[in-house]
Image (cartoon, grey):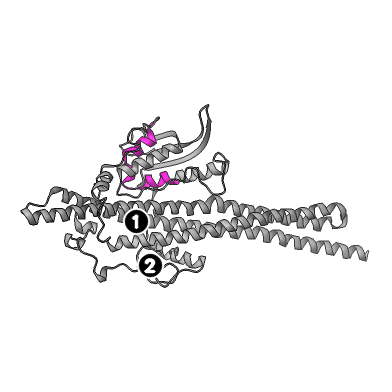
Amino acid sequence: MSVGAPRALASSGQKPITEILHPLSAAEEPLSVTVGGDKEVGLTNGTPVETSSPASTSSLFNRLQLDDDLEADVRDPYADSTEMRDLFVTVDNPKKHISTMETYITYRVSTKTSRVEFDLPEYCVRRRYQDFDWLRIKLEDSQPTHLIPPLPEKFVMKGVVDRFSEEFVETRMKALDKFLKRVADHPVLSFNPHLNAFLTAKDLNKRQGLALLSKVGESVKHVAGGYKLRARPAEFCAMGEYLDTFNQKLGTIDRIAQRILKEQSEYLTELREYGGVYSSWVGSEEELRRPLEGVAGCVTTSCGALEDLGDNMSLDFLPVLREYVLYLESIKNVLRKRDQSQAEYEGRLEAAILRKQEDRTPMPLEVEKCQDKVECFNADLKADWERWQSNKRHDFKQLLTGMADRNINSYEKSQAAWESLITLLQDKQTEDKTSETN
């Protein structure tokens, strides 16, 4: 059972035995989801709502509830006072290592803490990607009821071929830093002994238990393997439907953003060639030197602004989308484990009821333990779901606000450059008139 998971049915939301063994009533049936139709799972908190599918980016922004009014209702997970936190981690300073056997990148992991579980207040170790992967596997095995934040993919990254390139390493470092911060900020995962070892040990013993399943997962796998779940509770049905819908939205945004980046890159190539024509023109038109150089300068400024805009999208915007796509897979994985745990409980309960009817034996202790597992899954998953929703709201508000600011800055730079050209041309015209008069 996970730390802090309540055993009481009322606190966990677990239904009584009689309700679990029967299908949901009509009042409890979850709303159907039709993507692109009249009904759709809400993109606010996973609760079914009736609404039309958003047809524009602004509609999606509204559905994500990025209004300032929500800040009073939903606590910003990153707005906590630093005095209330006692574990700070940072991933930075990537370093390339070359040996006769392999070439790899390590990252500096710095830790500051006041927790008694740590022998020292500060630690500094170097870790490579496979060490982070080891940590995530250990967290999944030891905390099966909790949502483990995703790691960036090991090799695949759109538009990047060289995994040792500066762009790839920088993007991965940011993702690893976010992963570790999410774990350290979690009220249960942050106390996991494997995290302690990851943050403090000079050398990790990664062989032990690397490929082992947890005892909980193993028992569920064998007992529930051939049992069909009767009915997933409505709140978890809503979670699954929400995840499917949100995944489609993210996929659409990602595909469009990729096309925008490609078109911007092609336009940037043409724009640079366009500016070069004015620069070369100066050599044959001395009288037009200043206007031509002014146009060339404006084009160069526009090129720089557009290039920065594309870099920000590829390095900041797209990685967040990809992280949340991976996050959705993590949540679905926990949901599947929860369903398996419920199936195990229902299977054991049915068998126990049959035995009791035959020989009037008391309810086995293993049935109660299985019920505890279901309660633990329900309580932990709901708590992590609310935490994830709060993180998502914060991340997307920050992401979209930053994207708007960068677009405004980019166009303001271009506008300022072209406005300065108007002044230059007016001055040139005044000079020409003066010369003609004289």
Query: Along the polypeptide, which appears first: circle 1 or circle 2?
Result: 2
* Residue 412 in the image, given as x and y percentages of width and height: 64, 60
- Extreme residue in the right direction: 438
* Residue 177 in the image, given as x and y percentages of width and height: 45, 44
Position of residue 198 in the picture relative to residue 154 (left or right): left
Circle 1 crowding by C-alpha within 10 Å: few under 14, some 14–19, many from 20:
some
Circle 2 crowding by C-alpha within 10 Å: few under 14, some 14–19, many from 20:
many
Image quadrant where residue 117 sits: top left
Label 1 with label 2: CB-CB less than 8 Å: no
Is residue 78 visible to the viewer in this orientation of the structure? no
Q: Secondary structure at mark 2?
A: loop
Distance of label 1 from label 2 (alpha carbons): 20 Å
Q: Is residue 39 above or below residue 385?
A: below
Q: Residue at x 45, y 51 (%)?
A: 323
Quarter of the figure with the C terminus: bottom right
* Residue 240 in the image, given as x and y percentages of width and height: 35, 59
Q: Nearer the viewer, mark 1 or mark 2?
A: 2
Q: Nearer the viewer, residue 35 or 398?
A: 35
Q: Which residues are magenta?
A: 178-202
Is residue 105 visible to the viewer in this orientation of the structure? yes
Q: Secondary structure at mark 1?
A: helix
> What's under tag 1, amino acid-wise?
Trp
263 in magenta: no
The label on residue 385 is 1
Q: Nearer the viewer, residue 146 or 252?
A: 252
Position of residue 309 in the picture relative to residue 212 (left or right): right
> What's under tag 2, amino acid-wise?
Val
Q: Is residue 113 above or below residue 54?
A: above
Image quadrant where residue 8 sits: bottom left
Q: Which residue is label 2 attached to?
A: 33
Position of residue 222 in the picture relative to residue 108 (left or right): left
